[in-house]
Amino acid sequence: MELSQAQARVDGWVREHGGYWDRFHILARLSEELGEVAGALQREQGLRPRQSSADLGEEVGDLLFTLIAFANANGLALDACLGKVLEKIEIRDGEAWKAKER
């Protein structure tokens, strides 16, 4: 699925279910979802007891849905946002993303 298609699909769902929340509320929800991703990763790595059936993939999906809703609420096209950052990383920040020895 293209990012623009995902944005349209999320937009349709949000509009069918009462519309967008305040942008700061969505941002707070984004932070909450990121915390859930961290918790799922900790459970997957055995660093936290497994109390939830939610897996890492499901939590990343929740985070992505919320990020798309945030982008939509702010009038951002994710294709353009990602294109700009990829260009920046490829040109300027290539060394910053090299794998580090562990």
Image (cartoon, rainbow, N blue to C red):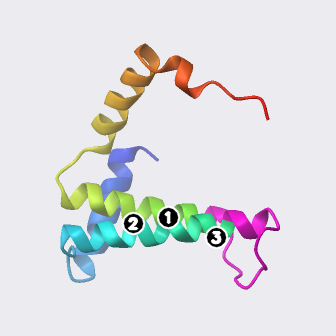
Indicate which disc, 1 or 3, sits on the residue closer to the N terminus.
Answer: 1
Callout 2 crowding tier (Cα within 10 Å): few <14, some 14–19, many ≥20: many
* Magenta residues (range): 41-58
Q: Is residue 2 left or right of residue 16?
A: right
Q: CA distance from mark 1 to mark 3?
A: 9 Å
Residue shown at 51% from the left, 18% from the top? 94
Counting from the top left corner in percent of width and height, residue 14 is at 28, 73
User: In the depicted view, which residue is nearer to us: 47 or 65?
Assistant: 47
Counting from the top left corner in percent of width and height, residue 68 is at 35, 57
Callout 3 crowding tier (Cα within 10 Å): few <14, some 14–19, many ≥20: many
| Rendered view: 12 above or below 93 | below
Specify the farthest residue to the right. 46
Q: CA distance from mark 1 to mark 2?
A: 6 Å
- Is residue 89 inside the magenta stretch? no
Mark 3 highlights which residue? 39
Mark 1 highlights which residue? 34
Kind of residue sitting beneath label 1: Leu
Counting from the top left corner in percent of width and height, residue 8 is at 29, 57
Mark 2 highlights which residue? 30
Q: Choose top left, top right, bottom left or bottom right for residue 40.
A: bottom right
Kind of residue sitting beneath label 2: Leu
Kind of residue sitting beneath label 3: Gly
Residue shown at 79% from the left, 79% from the top? 49
What label sits on residue 8 in the rendered view? none
